[in-house]
Amino acid sequence: MPDKRNKLPQHLQVWQEQARDDLAQRLRINASEIVLEQAENVTWSDGALGCPEPGMFYTQALVPGYRIVFSASSSKHYYHGQHGKPPFYCPAERAGEPLADTPESVT
């Protein structure tokens, strides 16, 4: 699957590059081995931004943000964020879905 980073809106391009570099360090691989699967603006259903931690409580309000999904080392890797803030790594076992009616997806 070809990498689609050149089609991303500018704000997602910056976050995608930062997330890719972070994932390359986490996996100890070259960033060129990481494939961008999806990058999209989303609306998260609460302050957990789709990545709740056990035992934590979050604001119950809609939060505009984004989700970036990569594939590398035979698995998918997720980065979530809130508009205007950098992405954070979300372990696959905690990665939730954004609200269904989210616009502007690049897949």
Image (cartoon, rainbow, N blue to C red):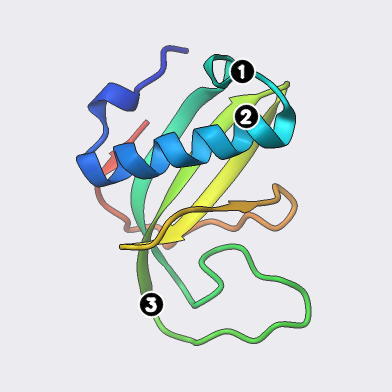
Task: Find disc 2 in the rendering and name its residue.
Answer: 24
Coordinates of residue 43 in the picture (x, y in percent)? 37, 64
Residue 106 percent coordinates (x, y): 32, 34
Measure the alpha-carbon separation of dots 1 and 3. 36 Å
Q: Which residue is mark 1?
A: 30
Location of the C terminus by quadrant is top left
Amino acid beneath label 2: Ala
The nearer-to-camera label among 2 and 3 is 2
Apparent side of residue 56 relative to residue 102 in the rendered image (left or right): right
Q: Is residue 83 left or right of residue 76?
A: left
Label ID, residue 62: 3
**Upstream in the sequence, badge 1 or badge 2?**
2
Q: Position of residue 44 (x, y in %)?
A: 44, 67
- SS for dot 3: loop
Q: Tell me how far mark 1 sits from mark 2, CA to CA.
A: 6 Å
Determine the residue positioned at 39% across, 44% down. Answer: 15
In this rendering, position of residue 88 left or right of residue 15: right
The one nearer the camera, 79 or 14, is: 14
Q: Is residue 54 above or below residue 16?
A: below
On screen, 76 above or below 51? above
Mark 3 burial class by Cα count in 10 Å: few <14, some 14-19, many 20+: few
The answer for how far apart the CA atoms under marks 2 and 3 are is 31 Å
Secondary structure beneath disc 1?
Answer: loop
